[in-house]
Amino acid sequence: MQDLVLDRPIVQKYGGTSVGTLERIQNVAKRVAEQYRQGQRQIALVVSAMSGETNRLVELVSGINPHSSLRNYDMAVSAGEQVAVALMAAALEKEGLPSLGLLAYQLGIFTDSLHSKARIREIDCQRLYQCWADGIVPVVAGFQGVTENLEITTLGRGGSDTSAVALAVALNAAVCEINTDVDGFYTADPRVVPDARLVEEMDFEVALEMASLGSKVLHTRCVELGAKFHMPIIVRNTFTPNDHQRTIIMNLSTQRKLEAPVVSGVTLDRNVVRLSVTQLPARGGMIAAVFDTIAASGVNVDIIVHNKQENSDSMRIGFTIGSADLVRTRALLESWCRDQGGNISCEAAEGLAKVSVVGLGMQSHPGVASRVFSVLENEGVAIHMISTSEIKISCVVAERDGDKAARILHRAFIEEEVR
Ligand code: ASP
Ligand code: MG
């Protein structure tokens, strides 16, 4: 099928597996050349490093010095994209399309100076406009940025999705296409829930929840950017023809939101740890002090429960964090508890998972939460913690129950399509 030719720029991002071999790079170049010949002249490509390459570079740095400065880390791990950009530009030339590879410092993708998790501040698009005026297809390095002082930064693992959407916003592009190795967003992870199906249109709000709840399709920050600037994002599989199923993430109209299914997706996050602080004196400032301690280390806290311990003047706070942050957070909290004196103590529970149902329809359907709980409890899945918002209900369950919980919720809310 011929893709629609748009009179505004389009950004196409190709991820690591899409450029994982020379043959794949050449296939991408063929697709782009075809679109160019059909009249799509303003195309900007964003590429990731070839699959496995960034991991290899990370291992090299930590192999030499696990405590290396993040400046060295960024300089090393951003190198994978440099190679991929040059190879893609060379492949386009072979297809007869003049092309120009551009690294972040050459284009001007300016970020703050938070090495290894920098945020984009501004993108200078001049060279891209010049490329298009000269009939050249630019290929931009994803994942990397540059500070005002010309220091190399990276945006965090998986960050080239964010590079692509930020570039699309800067160019006022018609759409940002993310080419990857899955067809798009599914109602659940098909490896866990075999009956999961592709969602063809998804509102930004739902996509944001799905991305941050651990469906690894997109870098969460890229969805945030898309939502903030109303930039439609197409997620599609590089290895399928142009008319194959795909997901488009955009602002659904109010009407469509009203008609949205109650639940659009079920997610499962297996990397959940619960920390609890007990015997906390029930006086002002204590809760803030606990969370200040954690926030100072940059760790994200998710579900929080707080209660007063019976027959005493003390409180108990429980909260979840990602398991990757456990060692650091526990060490911080233990030392904080010691500094406080008294009986304050902290304990961790591992072996947990978080299962969530997400959907716009929940806003207008009362009783979704109670149904989630009864579906889980009727099947013998014990719920440890709960959090709810207008479009999401999350339950922390034992990790061994995680897959089952996702499957039964998917069956109850999606396969049986409650409306
Ligand atoms: N190459 C980088 C990574 O592996 C960025 C990306 O692929 O999005 O994290
Ligand atoms: Mg990725």
Image (cartoon, rainbow, N blue to C red):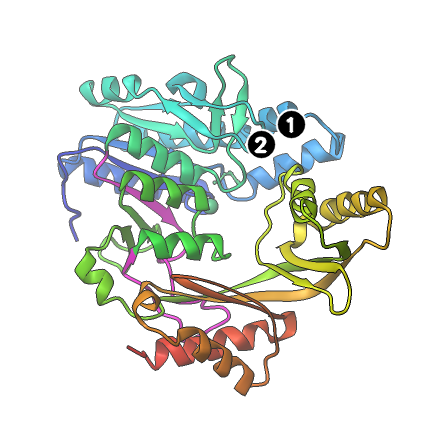
Query: Dot 2: within a 10 Å radius of its alpha carbon, few (fewer than 14), some, or many (20 or more) residues?
Result: many
Three-letter code, disc 1: Leu
Does the magenta run of residues contain 360? no
Q: Which residues are magenta?
A: 173-202
In the image, is 247 to the left or to the right of 151? left
Question: Mark 2: which secondary structure?
Answer: loop
Tell me residue 303's x, y (percent): 57, 58
Pointer 2 residue: 116
Determine whether 381 is above or below 333 in the image: below
Tell me residue 84's x, y (percent): 45, 33
Q: Quadrant of residue 368?
A: bottom left
Question: Mark 1: which secondary structure?
Answer: helix
Kindly report the distance in space between the C-alpha atoms of the residues bearing marks 2 and 1: 6 Å
In the image, is 39 to the left or to the right of 357? left
Query: Dot 1: within a 10 Å radius of its alpha carbon, few (fewer than 14), some, or many (20 or more) residues?
Result: some
**How many numbered circles does the render carry?**
2
